Image: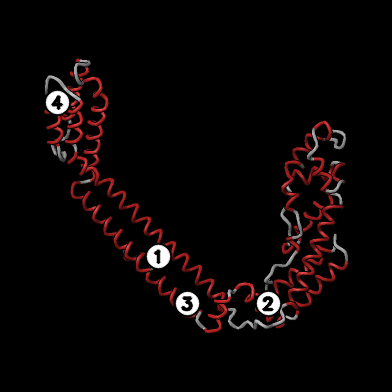
Amino acid sequence: MSTESLVDDLRSARQALEDAEAAVAAIGEDQLERLRSARDDLLSLLDSYEGRATGSGDFQAYLEFQEAVADHVEDLPEDLPEREVFEAIDESFEKRRLSESDFDAARDALGPVDDLVDRLGQREQAHERYRATRRDVESRLREIDEEIDRLERVATLADADLDAPVDELREPMTSYNDSVADAFTSFKRDDPARDVLAFVEATRSFPLARYPDPPDDLAAFLADASVGTEPIPTLLEYADYSRSKLEHYVDQPQTFMRVVGGNRTYFDRLDAEPLQFEWPPAPADEVRWRADELVSVVNRFAPDSVVEQLERVHALARDEPHYEHLRLTARAREELSQAERERVAAGAVGDDIEALESERERLTTALEEY
């Protein structure tokens, strides 16, 4: 929806709300609430007695109904809007015999009352329309802010050299990522489960390479139980055994099923991701700091060849000007569509941001005005 359409809808919704509020104020909210209560009570009487007080039915019910309607109308405030409608309905029931058509006619006679009471509902509908329209405008403003942020990031890529040899950066990072993933898979597959969890817990000292903490009961159980010397795949195989079969392999089968079987998802999600580099890569200083910590973490389980690949990445990040030149290219290639590259090259991104800022100002003003 265009900006002008949103503004027009907001203006219209505000005017409709003001009209609805004025219509209620012209009668008075308290008066309309009393009128609604009087109408609803009368309709309740009609519904309650219609089947019993019509035709040659229950004569006692007929008398009770006439008396109840008369008492209801007599108790109405003298200044109640459309009080005469209730009086006319009361008079219409003063006859020797009532039929269903008399009840239908009474409901129809309440039309003027309904019209006034409906002003309360119309005001609420106007309120909801107004609130919904404001939400639409606010949602569009959030979209504009997000798009401006994105375009500002795009603008930072205007100086990227799209022909730069970005593989000088990608290849060492990809090689390291693949190697550390393979090494961790082997570690998780072959080493005792308690050693794997001990490694995970040790990463608490390295915030840039930290794993999510294992569940407390899982770590404590595997640290003490003899089954903790088994590798994780074996534990997960045991978790699929029946209780009777498991008793032959585990000393505390019930605890094992609760702690290990109940934490299968944790084991399934345990991988090398906390030890890998993202792509496009982070700034050089972040990569250097992270690589420093990763060396201390990765050498706890991975072969020297993986650590050597990590050190290659670290060396690249130390040559900050060259690294950032390649990083800018990598970001541009990953983040920009062909159309965006063309607009960046043409210098049109600034125009796009200016247009969005103008739209934002128009909508912000409309929210304040309406």
Q: CA distance from mark 1 to mark 2?
A: 38 Å
Q: Amino acid at mark 2?
A: Arg
Mark number, residue 327: 2
Q: CA distance from mark 2 to mark 4?
A: 89 Å
Q: Secondary structure at mark 4?
A: loop
Please say if the residues under marks 2 and 3 sit with CB atoms less than 8 Å apart: no
Choose between 143 and 295: the one closer to the eye: 143
Residue bearing mark 4: 93
Please say if the residues under marks 2 and 4 sit with CB atoms less than 8 Å apart: no
Q: Amino acid at mark 4?
A: Phe
Q: Residues within 10 Å of mark 4 (few under 14, many from 20)?
A: some
Q: CA distance from mark 2 to mark 3?
A: 25 Å
Mark number, residue 1: 1
Choose between 242 and 353: the one closer to the eye: 242
Earlier residue among tags 1 and 3: 1
Residue bearing mark 3: 352
The image shows residue 40, relative to residue 354, as above or below, that is above
Q: Secondary structure at mark 2?
A: helix
The image shows residue 78, relative to residue 99, as above or below, that is below
Q: Residues within 10 Å of mark 2 (few under 14, many from 20)?
A: many
Residue drawn at (72%, 81%) of the image: 165
Earlier residue among tags 2 and 4: 4
Q: Amino acid at mark 3?
A: Asp
Residue drawn at (81%, 35%) of the image: 253
Please say if the residues under marks 4 and 1 sit with CB atoms less than 8 Å apart: no
